Amino acid sequence: MRRRIQQLEFDFRQHGGKRKGAGRRPKGAEPGMPHRQRSKKKRGEPLHITVRIAGGLPSLRRGGALKVVLAALSASCDRHGMRIIQYSIQKDHLHLLVEADDRECVARGLNALRSPLARALKKLWGRRGKVFPERYHDEVISTPTQTRNALRYVLQNGKKHGVVAQSSIDLCSSALTFNGWRERPSIASIPTAPVVAAVAPASTWLLTTGWRRHGLLDLRELPQHNKHPGRPRRNPAQSSRRATSR
């Protein structure tokens, strides 16, 4: 009898001037995300978002914390105009691929995710203080190549951190329900039925059709962070020949 994948539900002052040393102080031992103006985003462009928790907190991938995060993602997968399409839960951060009409929708959607999640985690851990002390980081996805790279980076991120075998899928991600694998992952070897968060169906051209122009994802592909994700990488041999011919 074939097991079904379970999807969780969730009920869930003064600023310094320009003098040296002035301004807002770092919230931790190291400065967090700088308060720079975020890049412009068009309606059909997805976002790759990274959300980090404070240092010294327990892992998000274990026990009750994992269940709390999965439930919170399910509850926030389609709220305030922001839709979570894919996700990956790592020890101290989350990777999300989202669609939204504008940045106001993203801000409201992430607030609807982070606020109840922070309260639930503090209750679980019996702790005080901020769970998410920094701003979230985001990257606008605008090309098919960049979209494929982002999908690979999010879904295979556990392999980047060495917590998932190269030939396996990360059960702390949406990889199990992703329909863009070259070879369908099998859950026959998993002892218990996996629990995943509900995600919203993709609607943008880039996340439904565009990225597939460069081929489906292979389970053994490792995530790579390209400095220019939207541009194809040059072959080193071709680059050296060009340099010699000049």
Image (cartoon, helix red, strand yellow):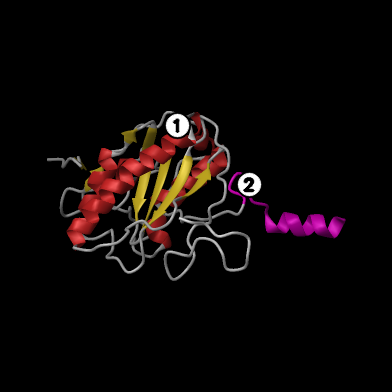
Residue at figure coordinates x 55%, y 60% from the top left:
16
Q: What residue type is labelled 2?
A: Pro
Give the residue at mark 1: 208
Q: Can residue 111 be seen in this view?
A: yes
Q: How far apart are marks 2 and 1 (CA)?
A: 20 Å
Q: Does the magenta stretch include residue 176?
A: no
> Quick one: label 2, few (<14), some, or many (20+) residues within 10 Å?
few
Q: Which amino acid does label 1 sit on?
A: Thr
Task: State whether residue 185 appears in this view.
Answer: no
- The residue shown at (35%, 59%) is 53
- The structure residue drawn at horizontal position 55% and vertical position 38%, both measured from the top left corner, is 144
Instruction: Please identify the quadrant where the N terminus is shown.
Output: top left
| SS type, badge 2 | loop
Disc marking residue 118: none
Would you place residue 28 above or below residue 205 in this image? below
Q: Is residue 229 magenta?
A: yes
**With 81 as the anchor, is 147 left or right in this view?**
right
Residues in magenta, as a range: 228-246
Residue 122: image location, x then y, percent? 23, 58
As drawn, the residue found furthest toward the front would be 14
Please name whichever residue, 93 or 54, is drawn nearer the observer in this view of the structure.
54
Q: Position of residue 155 (x, y in %)?
A: 39, 49
Measured as percent of width and height from the top left, residue 106 is found at: 43, 38
| Image quadrant where one finds the C terminus | bottom right
